[in-house]
Amino acid sequence: MKKRFIFSIIIILSCSICLYSQFEYYKPDTNIINHHKGERSLSVSPSLLINTPNGIQLAGGLKTRFFVSNRLSLDADFVLGRRYAHFGPGLVAVPFLLIKPNALNSDYEFDTLGDYLFFLGFYALSFEHIAYHIPLKQSIDFSPYVTLLRIRSAGADEFPAAGNPGSAHLSFATGIELNRYFGRFLLSPYVEYNIGYRDHISGINLGIYCGISFQ
């Protein structure tokens, strides 16, 4: 399973590099970076998990991001490690926005009322992970974020994987990213604190996301 996950990350990174060469280099007109509504990105990350049932361990992550304004973005992440995983409802919602970014426009027409209500439900779910982007200079911003409804599953190695896959709990997380843009390509080191609502187990995750931005 881990080999397949690592192989998938390598494939995504390779595709990102190829796509990057096909995009025009982004040169802002001002001295600070300026995002816009509808801007999207896809990133992968090596991560370090601290204070899991297995102590300190490595993991891999995938993140999607969608800007709903020039400063506010809805994010969704999925992190997988040895007998560890976390994700949120936004993992379902944000990819929908990536596919149909124009759905946020007031003049966008849905085929049926059901489609519209379906979109509103997805859109509401995506607010479980929200980030605010503060520009520092032409190609750098930092973004504090909060995750209100993360699903976290962690188990210890001394239990057989089939017999005790690890209990799943709802948790809260808050953290900060530093986003450095190289044209469409971006590097985003991050650190976050998380704690379970019911088990009150806390931890710290850190890593660096590598991805590509779609204007």
Image (tube, rainbow, N blue to C red):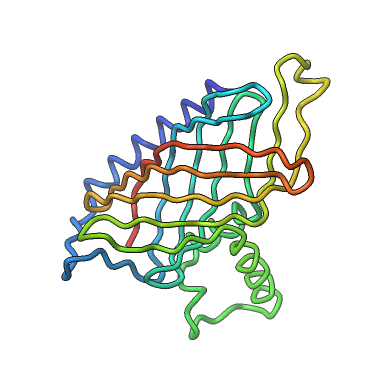
Residue that appears at 48% across and 60% down: 131
The correct choice, above or below, for 3 with respect to 98 in the image is above
- Residue 179 lies left or right of residue 22; in this view the side is right
- Residue 11 lies left or right of residue 120; in this view the side is left
| Closer to us: 99 or 32 | 32
Residue that appears at 66% across and 54% down: 89
Quadrant for the N terminus, please: top right
Q: List x then y, in percent, for residue 60.
A: 50, 32
The correct choice, above or below, for 100 with respect to 109 in the image is above
Q: List x then y, in percent, for residue 32.
A: 22, 65
| Closer to us: 176 or 165 | 176
The correct choice, above or below, for 191 with respect to 99 in the image is above
In this rendering, the count of numbered labels is 0
Residue that appears at 22% across and 46% down: 21
Residue 116, quarter of the rendered image: bottom right
Q: List x then y, in percent, for residue 53.
A: 68, 25
Q: List x then y, in percent, for residue 117.
A: 69, 75
- Residue 88 lies left or right of residue 136; in this view the side is right
Instruction: Farthest residue to the right: give it.
Output: 163
| Closer to us: 114 or 73 | 73
Quadrant for the C terminus, please: bottom left
Residue that appears at 50% across and 75% down: 104
